[in-house]
Image (tube, rainbow, N blue to C red):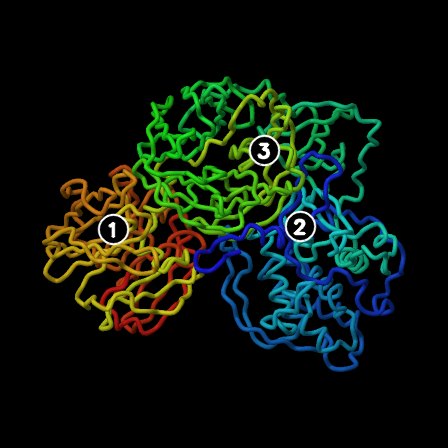
Amino acid sequence: MKQGAAGAVVATLALVLSLLVVSPATAAPQVVGAAASTTGSNVEAATGPLADTGIVKTAVVGFNPENIISDALFYDGNAMSSAEIQSFLDSKIGRCENGKCLNVLSASISSRDAWYSQVTGDLVCSALQGGTMRVSELIYRVQVACGISAKAILVTLQKEQGLTTSSAPSDWNLRAAMGASCPDTEPCDPAYSGVGPQIVQGVRQLKIYKAGRFGKQPGVNFIGYNPSASCGGTNLNIQNYATAALYNYTPYQPNAASLAAGWGLGDGCSSYGNRNFFNYYTSWFGSTGNGEGCAVPDSSAVTPSNGLYVINDDAVNARLAPSVGCTQGVRTLARNTLVAVTGTFSEWSRATFDGGAVWIRSDLLLPLAQTPAPAFQLDGTRHLFALASDGSILAYPFSSVGRWGDAVLLTRSPGLKQIIAVGDLDGDGHRDLIGIDSDPRPLLFRGDGVGLQAPTRLAVSWAGQGLVAGAGDFDGDGIGDVFTVDASGSLNLWRGDRQSGLRAAQAIGYGWGSMTALAGATDVTGDGRVDLVARSSSGALLVYAGNGLGGWQSGSQVGVGWGPMTAIATPGDFTGDGRSDLLARDARGGLHLYSGSGSGFAYLAQVGVGWQSMVSIIGPGPEIGAASLADVLRPGVGDIDGDSNPDVVATSAQGLMLYPGNGSGGWGNASVLDANWRTDDRIVTLSDFTGDGVRDLGRIRPDGSFLLAPGNGSGGLGAQVPIGYGWNTLDIVFGGIDFDGDNRPDVLARNSAGDLLLYRGDGRGGWAADARVIGTGWGMFDSIFAVGDFTGDGTADVMARAASGDLWVYPTTGSGGWQSPVKVGNGWGGFTSVFSPGNFDGTGGPDVLARTPAGALWLYRGNGRGGWSGSAQVGVGWSAFTQIQ
């Protein structure tokens, strides 16, 4: 949902595009799943003549909408051999009438490298060998590569186009074989037309939902009965990834009329895709392993109970029914997982987890009140901030399992109307807060690790701003930011400047005037990027996923009926399960916990009373410490053209050239960035050396002058400013690293003696101190450069190539020292240039680009854990450049 180059999210558009939901029967807030991906056939009855299937038309028995098929059966990459698939097709199709049937047809596909999720880094499908082959062989290869059962593929081909049994398929049937990239309301994508591309794309799509944590995930999700919102639907506690994948692929559940019709038509609100998947699978291959034998006791036999408990063993199975014989849909919960008990039956407790009911043995539960009380740490992340009516700023610590501790008074400032969590705004390693009173200039309360100091005014004015909320580290530079909505409805981002202030506002969204609440500084989707939760005037709850660079990925509606809530706060991971949760206050002062699912929120329990006296309730804000300083850990020239993707620059006879990255390992259109650069100029990466929020570049002339070329924020460079002389005595110079941990980018250089020198940046475009030696013996290397956080430990690293061709990583401590070096490669001596552009392909961690003598450019993908995840050639003709960065 980007608008123009600025990538602004249009809030009102998100309301239209997000998931349609049914209004709640009561005023209590409801939560639903994330917006659905509409692929596949949803509203047709059984495809193809029933006589071809050999299936008797009776009512569906045993269909469990929360567990359509088990993960073990669905993700079985060895379910059938190529010969077994061919035999099965022959038995179902028989004699082909037109030469186009799946049992006689050949399909062609190109070979494909392994696919990895850009979100999780997990393998989606391994490398696939292409060529022309029988369809049975293609299904087998895709089954093995992607780990999706051939049985599931055959069933999908049948329920989408009837191809598994058709003796005379049409060209249309073949072009849309799997229904892949064929939305209900739009034509199919021609890029995936044909049996081969359809099978590859369809199976890849079925796998990406799990591997990439994309779309609906296990847990509570709202699933409609039909594309028409008026038909309604229900919240389903989806039990496994396979069932979630089916609802992503075909996003509707059969209603009672559809199930009663067996293979026939139900009523005007019926859908049939997932019903038919179940019917075909059970008819052809037997049980889907969906827990048909898990009988739940009648509600009259369950003794009501109410309380919060934690799992009191290392691994406890939560079942769909109170019986160890119920083996389907089992979820293993770790020690200290928080659950809300609602009833007991014999030796079992019925509990709410992820919005659904599970059964847990009572002796494996411990009352929350019996867990250790938490200690308060201002610089930690396990507390709420609250502003009382008398101006008292209080902290309410909570433990890793959600137990409250005693309130702590941090300071008192009468007249305050709101407080904002911003993290460490001044860069001293302690958590700060912003306060709002009647003055349009906000107050900064600096933290000292224990309490808050007397406030000072920030040099910005929030006159005309309405809603205000902490944004967390929304732009990824390691410093907290703030969201505001002004009178025109613009959503503004105020970026922290690392120097106790905020930069000028930047509009990143329009049409936000209808919003009545904002809650930021939270990662709802679990992708490591900060998101924003908002409530509209209609009471809809929405999540806007950030891209980690100050822009947006998408927006989706995750709830309705939130209008009565008087406060919404993002506490981070309140329950200790690794996912971000939500707290909301009702009009009577009750505080309610909604556990995060990775795509939305599910109600868990009330966790507090008496909160009506608080003027403002907020979460702790972003993490404090060097591990969160993402911007200074990014190597390379960064994003020059403003599209949020790392770029590459190079010097040639035309000047300084810009080669924009596309974020996935490819390129945009090249352009001349500055025609005044010469081929003998040296490029120095500097990160945001001036502290204005824009990436800068350094230029060392042959005469030794060091010029700062500041980024202008619009895809170009500003007027160059001298920042040093005599730099021609240093043969290697690079920046883009915060070596000493002061939140300001530094520059490292090697002298003729082989010493590595540190030049500390002051964060304002100059130097904080004279150079000092931070290493000796570096003369053995012919290339040294910043590589970002290559090892994944939260601190910046340096990479160096020895004359022998060995490649080494020198991890830093993040505070001015070194950790032990690690060898990460050999045979690199043949490259004429080696450097890191950052995370060029958008997956794993920082990558490395290397140029061969012939001018070929190779991308070596970092895995984010100190190793590699593959390589690929990404360019030719690069030998014409004297410098590449």
Q: Residue furthest bottom?
A: 98
Q: Amino acid at mark 1?
A: Gly
Image location (x, y in percent) of residue 439:
39, 31
SS of the residue at dot 3? Answer: strand
| Tag 1 near tag 2, CB within 8 Å | no
Q: Amino acid at mark 2?
A: Ala
Image location (x, y in percent) of residue 364:
65, 25
Which residue is labeled 3 in the image? 334
Image location (x, y in percent) of residue 859:
38, 62
| Tag 2 near tag 3, CB within 8 Å | no
Please indicate whether residue 63 sits to the left or right of residue 639 in the image: right
Number of other residues with Cα within 10 Å of mark 2, as a class: few under 14, some 14 to 19, many 20 or more = many
Residue 319 against residue 196 in the figure, above or below:
above
Which numbered disc flags the more N-terminal residue, 3 or 1?
3
Please indicate whether residue 790 sits to the left or right of residue 158 in the image: left
For the residues marked 2 and 3, what is the alpha-carbon distance in whole angstroms?
A: 22 Å
Q: Quadrant of the C terminus?
A: bottom left
Which one is in front in this view, the residue at disc 1 or the one at disc 2?
1
For the residues marked 3 and 1, what is the alpha-carbon distance in whole angstroms?
A: 44 Å
Question: Which residue is found at the position 87% from the left and 69% from the top?
Answer: 51
Q: Amino acid at mark 3?
A: Ala
Question: Which residue is found at the position 63% from the left and 63% from the top?
Answer: 202
Number of other residues with Cα within 10 Å of mark 3, as a class: few under 14, some 14 to 19, many 20 or more = some
Which residue is labeled 1 in the image? 735
In front here: 879 or 693?
A: 693
In front here: 264 or 79?
A: 264
Which residue is labeled 2 in the image? 244
Question: Which residue is found at the position 52% from the left and 68% from the top?
Answer: 112
Which one is in front in this view, the residue at disc 3 or the one at disc 1?
1
Number of other residues with Cα within 10 Å of mark 1, as a class: few under 14, some 14 to 19, many 20 or more = many
SS of the residue at dot 2? Answer: helix
